[in-house]
């Protein structure tokens, strides 16, 4: 291809990018242009050239016309139908399977007044409402304006509208002008077609089958058709008149009183029903052209009445019900006599069964006692037990944290384990008694439960020791939370059952999971609990009632704590080298 510029005829700068040198279409406006070849279509401007619909059938198609319509693009081809790109830049290929007439497309034109897309082929001209392309319809509404059989508009076969590229169509005074081998064809854009009228369906016959004997009823002679009682198998014949294409009609029907939804019949001309019950039914029929909406289709109906047989009447059903009741009464009298004979034998078995039940209850009570020993909840405080925490709850929490770890770390949130040990709690048992000590533990459990958030929970770790799992807390708030727990415990007065009061303190040790080490995610949660316990012991040794935790240097590798048996000694060694620091906060 060549371009005529002010300095003469020059070769098109993008010729080397074209797969075919056979140019079939060119349209350029304001520096932007569309180019069609025998192998694909292109869009070009000053910045470069782009192949349209790369990888699709369009890339190998013979292009005949390219038409931009607002934010959409239509590309006509000689061999692969019509290609359409919507405002989301998604391509679709439309051909005979979507309702387009057969034949190569020669030109396209958009009527912005009546919103029609006009298409010419070597066999005629048809138009389509542009609105249906916005709805991604699979079956297109096509109106054939000129076919090979329209003699008054040069309807000789394969002679209508032959021509290529920009010379294939012209618009003048609300008419479109198309070339043909015998001259020009003028078509008013507002032409009204015979095919625009609705298709009127017709119910022709009702054929009733009674044990092989068929009776045909001519439906047009009556509004309501009353059948014979035994006629339960029906075939309804129907049709519709379409002068444009007698076979191009879609049907659907339903039998009101039996069918819940419409039945799609497509091109069928019969509706069959077998073993119908007695009653009143209304057969409804609709017909339309392909791509026409069912809501605009014409509907006709036929009322059918099937009388009830004697075995379907209320009298017959009452007789059956009364007979059934009488039979039940006879059976009841028989079994009542049998039951009286068995009464004495049952009374003899009562004592034996009672003894067996007592024995079973004793075994059940023993089983219940064993279940209490392995219960998931602590019997005294109602908190989660250590067994449930270790084998049930904690693994699920670890899995949840690992799956959401990146998101939680971005939010600055963490998972932390706090161990609270009551200082000199044996003094309470010695002074007030074990019952008072249990009461104290219950009060402490209630206090801790009130302090934690909804996602966190408290575990009865041992006799006077509790573990708190924080699952959704800011890293910087963990230590303050631990101090708050220790402070509230120290400030609270615990009332004994006899009315006397006492005060308690508790030491707290805590640690993160995973540990803030290089590769800390490979260290198990048991290590975090052990480090929290060691911090607790440090706090109790220095000052009971304080809070302690370890901080680690950024260059410490998680391998240092791989051996769980040497964690305490390893911490002591790292404390001496100041790679680990112990932080103890007093109340």
Image: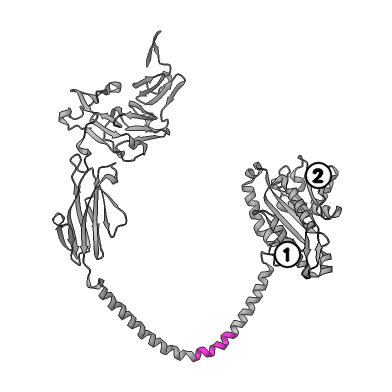
Classify the position of the N terminus by image quarter: top left
Please give left or right for residue 94 compared with residue 586 in the image: left
Residue found at the very far front of the displayed protein: 499
Residue range corresponding to the magenta coloring: 344-354
Residue at 40% across, 8% down: 6
Q: How many tags in the picture?
A: 2
Query: Crowding near pointer 2: few (<14 within 10 Å), some, many (20+)?
Result: some
Q: Residue at x 67, y 43 (%)?
A: 412
Residue furthest top as drawn = 7
Q: Is residue 413 above or below residue 353?
A: above
Depth check: give the residue in front, 220 or 49: 220
Q: Closer to the camera, 531 or 542? A: 542
Mark yes or no: residue 128 visible.
yes
In the structure shown, which secondary structural element does the residue marked by tag 2 occupy? Answer: strand
123 sits left or right of 482 in the view: left
**Residue 374 on image: x %, y %:** 68, 67
Query: What main secondary structure does the magenta stretch of the protein show?
Result: helix
Q: Which mark is residue 271?
A: none
- 307 vs 414, left or right, is left
Q: Position of residue 96 (x, y in %)?
A: 29, 37
Reading the image, the residue beneath label 1 is 442
Query: Where's residue 97, x and y in %?
Result: 30, 39
Where does label 2 land, which residue?
580
Secondary structure at numbered mark 1: helix
**230 within the magenta span:** no
Residue 345 inside the magenta-drawn segment: yes
Q: In whole angstroms, how far apart are the C-alphas of marks 2 and 1?
A: 37 Å
Q: Rate crowding at label 1 as few (under 14), some (14 to 19) or many (20 or more) other CA atoms within 10 Å.
A: some
């Amino acid at each position: 291809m060549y371009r005529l510029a002010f300095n003469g005829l020059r070769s098109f700068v993008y010729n080397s990018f074209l797969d075919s040198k056979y140019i079939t279409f060119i349209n350029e406006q304001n520096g932007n242009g569309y180019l069609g070849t025998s192998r694909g279509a292109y869009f070009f401007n000053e910045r470069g050239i782009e192949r349209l619909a790369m990888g699709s059938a369009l890339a190998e198609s013979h292009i005949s016309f390219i038409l931009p319509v607002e934010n959409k693009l239509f590309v006509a081809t000689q061999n692969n139908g019509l290609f359409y790109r919507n405002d989301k830049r998604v391509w679709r290929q439309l051909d005979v399977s979507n309702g387009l007439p057969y034949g190569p497309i020669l030109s396209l034109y958009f009527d912005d007044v009546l919103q029609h897309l006009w298409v010419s082929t070597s066999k005629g001209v048809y138009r389509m409402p542009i609105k249906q392309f916005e709805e991604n319809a699979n079956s297109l509404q096509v109106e054939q304006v000129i076919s090979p059989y329209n003699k008054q508009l040069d309807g000789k076969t394969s002679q209508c509208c032959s021509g290529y590229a920009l010379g294939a169509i012209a618009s003048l005074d609300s008419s479109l002008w198309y070339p043909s081998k015998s001259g020009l064809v003028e078509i008013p854009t507002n032409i009204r077609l015979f095919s625009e009228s609705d298709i009127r369906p017709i119910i022709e016959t009702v054929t009733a089958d009674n044990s092989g004997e068929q009776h045909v009823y001519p439906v047009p002679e009556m509004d309501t058709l009353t059948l014979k009682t035994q006629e339960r198998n029906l075939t309804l014949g129907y049709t519709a008149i379409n002068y444009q294409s007698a076979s191009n009609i879609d049907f659907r029907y339903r039998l009101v009183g039996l069918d819940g939804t419409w039945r799609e019949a497509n091109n069928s001309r019969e509706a069959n029903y077998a073993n119908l019950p007695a009653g009143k039914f209304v057969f409804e029929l609709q017909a339309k052209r392909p791509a026409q909406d069912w809501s605009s289709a014409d509907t006709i109906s036929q009322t059918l009445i099937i009388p009830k047989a004697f075995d379907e009447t209320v009298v017959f059903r009452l007789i059956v019900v009364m007979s059934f009741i009488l039979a039940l009464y006879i059976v009841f009298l028989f079994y009542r006599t049998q039951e009286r004979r068995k009464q004495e034998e049952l009374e003899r078995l009562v004592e034996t069964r009672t003894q067996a039940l007592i024995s079973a209850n004793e075994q059940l009570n023993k089983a219940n006692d064993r279940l209490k020993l392995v219960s998931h909840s602590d019997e005294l405080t109602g908190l989660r037990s250590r067994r449930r925490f270790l084998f049930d709850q904690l693994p699920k929490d670890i899995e949840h944290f690992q799956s959401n770890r990146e998101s939680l770390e971005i939010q600055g949130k963490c998972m932390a384990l706090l161990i609270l040990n009551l200082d000199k709690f044996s003094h309470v048992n010695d002074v007030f008694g074990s019952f008072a000590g249990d009461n104290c533990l219950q009060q402490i459990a209630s206090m801790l439960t009130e302090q934690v958030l909804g996602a966190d929970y408290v575990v009865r770790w041992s006799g006077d020791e509790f573990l708190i799992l924080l699952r959704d807390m800011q890293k910087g708030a963990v230590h303050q939370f631990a101090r708050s727990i220790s402070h509230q415990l120290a400030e609270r007065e615990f009332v004994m059952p006899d009315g006397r009061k006492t005060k308690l303190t508790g030491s707290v040790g805590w640690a993160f999971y995973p540990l803030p080490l290089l590769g800390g995610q490979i260290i198990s949660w048991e290590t975090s609990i052990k480090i929290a316990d060691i911090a607790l012991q440090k706090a109790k040794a220095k000052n009971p009632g304080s809070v302690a935790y370890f901080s680690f240097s950024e260059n410490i590798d998680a391998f240092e704590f791989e051996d769980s048996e040497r964690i305490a000694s390893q911490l002591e060694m790292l404390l001496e080298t100041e790679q680990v620091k112990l932080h103890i906060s007093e109340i």
